[in-house]
Amino acid sequence: MEAMKQAFYLIWLIHSVVIGENSKRLLLDDPDVATRFAQMEITIQKLTQQLSQLENNAGAGSTYVRWGRSLCSGDNTELVYSGYAAGQLYLHSSYTNRHGGPSNLLCMPGDPELTDITGNGTSLLYGAEYQENILKPDAHDEDVPCAVCRNTKTQNTLMIPGRKSCYSGWQKEYQGLVVSGHLAYSASSYLCMDKDPEYVPGGQVNNDGSLLYVTTTKCGSLPCPPYTNDKAINCVVCSK
């Protein structure tokens, strides 16, 4: 911001010197005027470059989680870290207390820095599993990877449910299907699972934990059309 103020000040100063020096009338064929204009052009070019650099650096970069994959594939993206999807247990000890606990999933890094503090077991984090074969024929019980990605050229990122393409002016990062926990189990959140999900190596054992299902539409308060009953929901992650 300070550099921008200085740039505008210099432009104002150049304007004052060239145009307003004691109300002196400038002639285009005056060698002194030509020299001043040449110097002013060079200065303006430098200031324009500086302003362009400031605009590129101001707020550049947006992050998002790519659920179901361990790498980033969008244009101008870099991998911040990869790891494992994790959340609360899909089902508590009884149906009367199944509504408690957090609803969001976390992308846990594959290289954690651990503490030596032992908790009391009142808040627990479990690995996430695909609980159906809808995303892939062999997905059931496989553990879910994730990647935190950064687009270096954009400032905003959002997930659009019900779409597989981005609106005009937005760049697609990845597309997939909306998933969540089971409606009869613990609270969960909606995620955009990659359309071609991967599995955590060695994670095919049925440990349950935080379970993910493909979400489908239900007509009623959700108007049909434009939606259709009991259909899986597209999703796309877009940046701008």
Image (cartoon, rainbow, N blue to C red):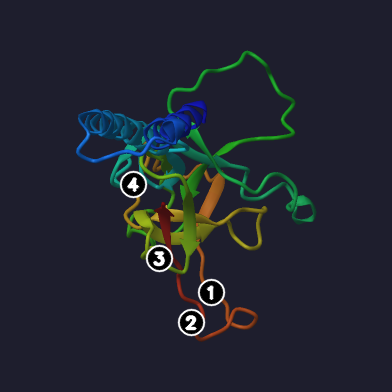
User: Residue 129, position in %: x, y?
Assistant: 48, 47
Q: Between tags 3 and 4, which lies in front?
A: 3
* Mark before the other along the chain sequence, 4 or 2: 4
Residue on which disc 2 sits:
228
Q: Between tags 4 and 1, which lies in front?
A: 1
Question: Which mark, by number, is residue 150?
Answer: none
User: Residue 91, position in %: x, y?
Assistant: 65, 50
Q: Are marks 4 and 2 in contact (CB under 8 Å)?
A: no
User: Residue 155, position in %: x, y?
Assistant: 45, 44
Question: Which mark, by number, is residue 167?
Answer: 3
Q: Are marks 2 and 1 in contact (CB under 8 Å)?
A: yes
* Mark before the other along the chain sequence, 3 or 4: 3
Separation of marks 2 and 1 at Cα, in angstroms: 7 Å
Type of amino acid under label 4 = Glu
Residue on which disc 1 sits:
217
* Mark before the other along the chain sequence, 1 or 3: 3
- The quarter holding residue 28 reads top left
- The quarter holding residue 33 reads top left
Residue on which disc 4 sits:
198
* Mark before the other along the chain sequence, 3 or 2: 3
191 is higher (above) or lower (below) than 1: below
